[in-house]
Image (cartoon, rainbow, N blue to C red):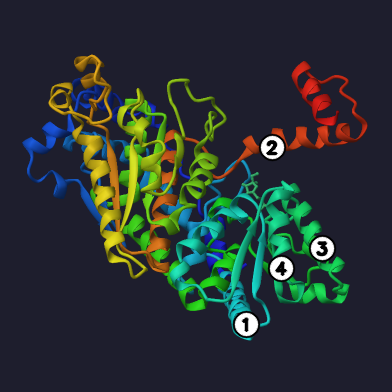
Amino acid sequence: MNAAAASAAAAAVVTAPRCDRTKAWGALQGHFEAHGRELDLREAFARDAGRFDAFSLQAPEVFADLSKNLIDVATRRFLLDLARECRIAERRDAMFAGAPINTSEGRAVLHTALRAPPGTAPFSAEVHGVLDEMLAFAEQVRGDGAFTDVVNIGIGGSDLGPAMAVPALDAFGQRGLRLHFVSNVDGHDIAPVLRELQPRQTLFIIASKTFTTQETMANAAVARRWFLAQGMAESEIGRHFCATTTNVQAAAAFGIARTFGFWDWVGGRYSLWSAIGLPIAIAIGAANFRALLAGAHAMDRHFVEAAPAANLPLQLGLLDVWYRNFHRFASRSIAPYHQGLRRLPAYLQQLEMESNGKRVGADGEPLPATLGTSPVVWGEPGTNGQHAYFQMLHQGTDVIPVEFIAVKRPGHDYPALHTMLLANCLAQSQALMQGKTAAEAATEHPPTASPTVDRAALARQRSFPGNRPSTTFVLDELTPRSLGALLAMYEHRVFTSGALWGINSFDQWGVELGKALCNQLLPRFANGDAAGLDGSTAGLLQRLMR
Ligand code: F6P
């Protein structure tokens, strides 16, 4: 064991009270009842000309305007007290040092070590050994021109990160090299991909931390059969298939000789920085992949070093608790105003909901029913979302905080389109906050309104409550570095809210029951045996088999 690994092994898990058992919680409750619940953003801006400056933060690569959130100076102060009482700083340091904070699996949580410069974090030699090897391979694939298509077969954390980052960084991609992502066990996913491929020019990456995941193994077997059916020899599998996994033996048993490894202290949903990032490295090249890591590392340093009041991931995690547990907002919408970020909401769904969708604490104690954890995270790129579900955001009965992501400089040559996009982005957060009274609506003459409609009823239907909160993140440009920083910001925010709730954000026992029941059902599809099943499952089984 080297020195860094030894110090990681020695790092201890920090104990701390759950958020609702602190003094700060009581203060927050009092503050919520007295001021928080009724805070009006329009009045807050009218009262305080400095609100934008007071509630915006600059972190590496990411500017965040938090001023359109339902917070004031006192909210922030009490939330910071909460962070102190819950020992977030000490727990963050324990994570970075390699303490086994994933207690139910006895594992460290060290995705931050994957993006740390050589010699500065635990397991540095191993991390940089694999990274160098993987990037050399990525350059080879890009350089020798033998491959025109790369197919990543993986699911969850072995798919969502690369599937999100590759289109996001399209401007940095190599032309003539097509990246495909197959994840679903539904054959409608792989079939159209295979249809377009030439086996001689195709590289398959079988991406699976465990190399046991049903969907990935099934799709990998389909790809292998297809490859051989195209007249390729078994001996050519070595050149056309590689694996990214912690389970090198299982990959070898599948017939894969070239494997890029990683470690059990890399959670699936935190793994795009590891060998799982191979498709990204092939798409954007080694130097750009290193820039992605450097951006994430810069955000890591910010999370560790910035003062609490200026610490963006910390502030976001605290805000999440404020909204979830005091305002009782049950969901948060992500609206990236950049088409390249179209898969970001799906990526964040796994990051946040698989991490913090828990109802029993890390100590094994069920959380009180009143202590909600992960909100539903969902969204679509703007402006598309505006023409779909923004109606509900503006006028629905639920308040849903929205997170806008705006990028100042586009990666294309259509400046007029970009200006329109940005104007739309600002207009939406403005409209959510500003609203429109029925009296204002009554002065309007909408051309599509029925001439016989009751004018007062129409005005009420056309009014907007406003005071709906939002955060706007601004990136100067969407680059590997800024994307890395943005994603690390989300990771640390999830760590913060999970730590406040006292849950283990790094296991995912909740996915297991369905997997086990699926394995029990599979043979019933062959023999039709519905004995012992509940009436609905039995009825559906028989209907699907008929
Ligand atoms: O089903 C959940 C999960 O275990 C995720 O946490 C993980 O990212 C995904 O499945 C894929 O797992 P693997 O990389 O081991 O195939």
CB of residue at label 1: within 8 Å of ligand 1? no
Q: Left or right: 175 with respect to 56?
A: right
Residue sitting nearer the eye, 455 or 335? 455
Classify residue 219 as left or right of residue 343.
right
Q: Is residue 299 left or right of residue 462?
A: right
Q: Which residue is mark 3?
A: 226
Task: Examine the rendered structure and indicate whether residue 446 appears above or below residue 269.
Answer: above
The residue beneath circle 1 is 140
Which residue is label 4 attached to?
Answer: 197
Is 106 rendered above or below residue 418? above
Which label sits in the foreground, 3 or 4? 4
Please, what is the three-letter code of the amino acid marked with disc 4? Answer: Leu
Density class for disc 3 (Cα within 10 Å; few <14, some 14-19, many ≥20) is some
Q: Tag 3 or tag 1, which sits nearer the N-term?
A: 1
Q: Badge 2: few (under 14), some or many (20 or more) residues near its Cα, within 10 Å?
A: few
Q: Earlier in the sequence, mark 1 or mark 2?
A: 1
Residue drawn at the location 25% of the way across and 59% of the way down: 419
The amino acid type, in three-letter code, at marker 2 is Glu
Which amino acid type corresponds to the residue marked 3 in the rendered image?
Trp
Q: Position of residue 432 (x, y in %)?
A: 25, 36
